[in-house]
Each structure stands twice: as C-alpha cells, then as structure tokens.
Amino acid sequence: MAAIGLNGLYRFPLARRAEFPPGRLHPYAGVGLGAFIARFETRMTALDVATHFADTDVRVGAQALAGVTFTPISDVGTRGGLATIQIDKLQFGLTTHMLQVGIAYHW
C-alpha cells in the first residue's frame, strides 16, 4: 500500500509562559485526503502449472488524526498521537488505526 496525500493540521498552543511564548503543550487535530495505491499479488502452482495473479487499485481515502506535542526545551519536542485511515471501495475492505510516537526538532 502506498499513499500520496495532503493533511491539514491545527495546533492549540497551551502552557504559555514569558520564557517560552509559543507554549510547551500543543494538542493537535487534523484531517487529510489522499490517493491510496494498493497492489495485491499472489503466485501459486495448480496441477504443476505456475499461475500468477496481480491487481493494482487506486482509491481516494481520508485520514483523521489527533495527538499532543510537548516541548520541554525550545527546539525539541516529543509527540504522540492516534490516526485512522478509511479507504473508499477497494475490492477488499481496509480500515487502519495507528499509534504514533516521535521526536520533533523545530528550527
């Protein structure tokens, strides 16, 4: 599965202080749309005859995500969030959920 998409994200700046005006805590929420390219392939041998089946399907999908970024020092933050993806009308159904964790460097 490959995806080409665009997400819109809004961050809510919280825990603002005089020493760090942008805020140290940033909950975020976002949505996105994309093209999802699914390739299914199988190879099998039936009665000693090699058989190969393959199919590629491209569909529109949507993503919703939410999480929080915490910035303990001015340029480095840690983040965690949840995302869900729903793809429209593939020949097989696909819905996926992700738990994301990361480190962010802001310049």
Image (cartoon, rainbow, N blue to C red):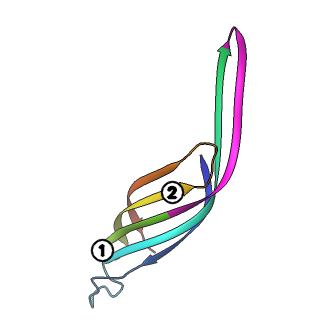
For the residue labelled by badge 1, is the local secondary structure a helix, a strand or a loop? strand
Q: Residue at x 72, y 16 (%)?
A: 50
Q: Where does the magenta region start and end? A: 46-63
Q: As shown in the figure, which amino acid type bears the numbered disc 1?
A: Ile
Q: Quadrant of residue 16?
A: bottom left
Q: Secondary structure at mark 2?
A: strand
Q: Is residue 24 above or below residue 90?
A: below
Mark seen at residue 6: none
Q: 14 and 48: which one is in front? A: 48
On whether residue 53 falls in the magenta region, the answer is yes
Residue beneath the point at 70% across and 37% down: 55
Q: Is residue 68 magenta?
A: no
Residue 41 is situated, as x and y percent measured from the top left of the image, at: 65, 32
Q: Position of residue 93 (x, y in %)?
A: 56, 46
Rendered location of residue 32, percent (x, y)? 55, 67
The residue at which mark 2 appears reads as 85
Of callouts 2 and 1, which one flags the residue occurring earlier in the amino acid sequence?
1
Q: Residues within 10 Å of mark 2 (few under 14, many from 20)?
A: some
- Which secondary structure dominates the residues rendered in magenta? strand
Residue at 64%, 43% in the rendered image = 91
State how far apart marks 2 and 1 are (Cα). 32 Å
| Nearest the eye: 71 or 10 | 10
Which residue position is annotated with label 1?
Answer: 73
Q: Position of residue 102 (x, y in %)?
A: 38, 59
Q: Which residue is nearer to you in this view: 18 or 94?
A: 94
Q: Residue furthest bottom?
A: 18
Q: Measuring 33% from the left and 88% from the top, which residue is drawn there?
A: 21
Position of 101 with respect to 44 (left or right) is left
Identify which residue, 14 or 84, lies in the foreground: 84
